[in-house]
């Protein structure tokens, strides 16, 4: 039987616009039987669902960690981690605090560049988010009329190594892979096509990445085929997700718009 899945979804716990509860309701409505909540550096969204308990949609615990290499941004998804693991929890707290300081630094840089923006402007956009991020800053800049879209704000000032960019807390991909494995989870490389360099992807495979996110809305068909081949060659998990944020103007704007069939996945243990 056809089953739809979505293993990469953000919520209001990080930079998504919909609460975890609404995400689950939408998944149910559009016939997605299995989802993973993969907020940036936090499990808060997933945990709120675990507490509320529901059985219509299978929910896999997930997280998306950011790491910065000098020239590349590498995002690593962790599936099935033990949310009570002490070391994992310690890192998650550290990362939340570091993200708050990082946003303050970005605001200071923007002020030096003559943008009139304050922490309260970003806080308004972040709402109750645990993980603050560049999309919150981008939205504040849009609200102030500096840019027509978040994407423009990224292109102009917030993108990697642009004038207001501040790197993430320094965790290497190797450290993230170890952290996920030590907390009982499976590390999967998010959107390898966006890493933009197969030498880096190959190094991550040698470092112990267990899967590739083959299906992602920013991958071309050719990229998906390429990473599917690579996954087959190295016996890796084949995963897929929509990277849904519910941000207007950012594809996919609705859940289910980017379809992933469970049958396309390989070696995914859930
Ligand atoms: P951060 O975690 O603060 O580094 O922000 C990462 C988030 O910014 C991810 O959700 C990305 O999809 C988003 N992002 C990265 N580049 C762009 C861009 N050019 N336009 C819009 N969003 C972006
Ligand atoms: Zn995001
Ligand atoms: Fe990502
Ligand atoms: Fe993501």
Image (tube, grey):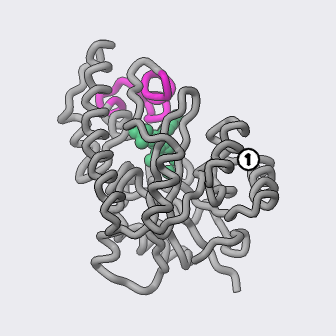
Where is 163 relative to 172, above or below?
A: above
Q: Nearer the viewer, residue 243 or 267?
A: 267
Q: Ligand 1 closer than 8 Å to the CB at disc 1?
A: no
**Hey, which quadrant is residue 124 in on the image?**
top left
Q: Nearer the viewer, residue 68 or 250?
A: 68
Instruction: Describe residue 85's horizontal placement relative to residue 214 as left or right.
Output: left
Q: Residue at x 49, y 54 (%)?
A: 178
> Where does residue 61 sit, x and y in percent of width and height?
44, 69
> Where does residue 184 sit, x and y in percent of width and height?
47, 68
Q: Indicate yes or no whether the magenta region holds residue 148.
A: yes
Instruction: Describe residue 187's horizontal placement relative to residue 118 as left or right.
Output: right
Q: Indicate yes or no whether the magenta region holds residue 189.
A: no
Instruction: Describe residue 248's horizontal placement relative to residue 22 as left or right.
Output: right
Q: Residue at x 36, y 23 (%)?
A: 146
* Visible residue check, residue 44: no
Q: Nearer the viewer, residue 119 or 50?
A: 50
* Visible residue check, residue 73: yes
Q: Quadrant of the C terminus?
A: bottom right
Q: Mark 1 — residue?
A: 220
Q: Quadrant of the N terminus?
A: bottom right
Give the residues drawn in magenta, as a range.
141-161
Disc 1, SS: loop
Q: How many marks?
A: 1
Q: Residue at x 50, y 56 (%)?
A: 244
Where is 161 relative to 257, above or below?
A: above
Label 1 Cα crowd, 10 Å radius (few <14 / some 14-19 / many 20+):
few
**Hey, which quadrant is residue 150 in on the image?**
top left
Instruction: Describe residue 58's horizontal placement relative to residue 51 as left or right.
Output: right
> Where does residue 115 sit, x and y in percent of width and height?
29, 18
Q: Residue at x 55, y 75 (%)?
A: 32
Where is 222 relative to 161, above or below?
A: below
């Amino acid at each position: 039987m056809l089953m739809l899945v979505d293993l990469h979804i953000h919520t209001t716990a990080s930079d998504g616009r919909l609460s975890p509860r609404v995400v689950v309701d939408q998944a149910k409505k559009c016939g997605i039987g299995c989802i993973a909540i993969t907020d940036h550096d936090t499990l808060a969204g997933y945990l709120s669902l675990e507490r509320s308990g529901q059985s219509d949609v299978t929910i896999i615990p997930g997280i998306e960690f950011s790491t910065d290499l000098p020239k590349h941004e590498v995002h690593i998804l962790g599936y099935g981690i033990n949310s009570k693991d002490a070391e994992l929890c310690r890192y998650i707290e550290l990362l939340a605090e570091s993200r708050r300081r990082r946003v303050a630094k970005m605001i200071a840089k923007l002020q030096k560049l003559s943008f009139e923006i304050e922490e309260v402007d970003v806080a308004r956009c972040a709402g109750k988010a645990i993980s603050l991020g560049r999309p919150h800053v981008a939205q504040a800049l849009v609200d102030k009329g500096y840019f027509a879209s978040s994407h423009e704000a990224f292109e102009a000032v917030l993108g990697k190594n642009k004038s207001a960019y501040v790197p993430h807390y320094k965790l290497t991909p190797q450290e993230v892979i170890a952290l996920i494995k030590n907390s009982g989870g499976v590390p999967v490389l998010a959107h390898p096509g966006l890493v933009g360099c197969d030498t880096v992807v190959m190094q991550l495979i040698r470092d112990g990445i267990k899967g590739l996110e083959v299906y992602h809305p920013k991958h071309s068909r050719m990229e998906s085929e390429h990473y599917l081949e690579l996954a087959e060659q190295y016996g890796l998990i084949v995963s897929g997700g929509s990277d849904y944020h519910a941000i207007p103007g950012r594809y996919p704007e609705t859940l289910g718009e980017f379809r992933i069939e469970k049958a396309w996945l390989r070696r995914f243990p859930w």
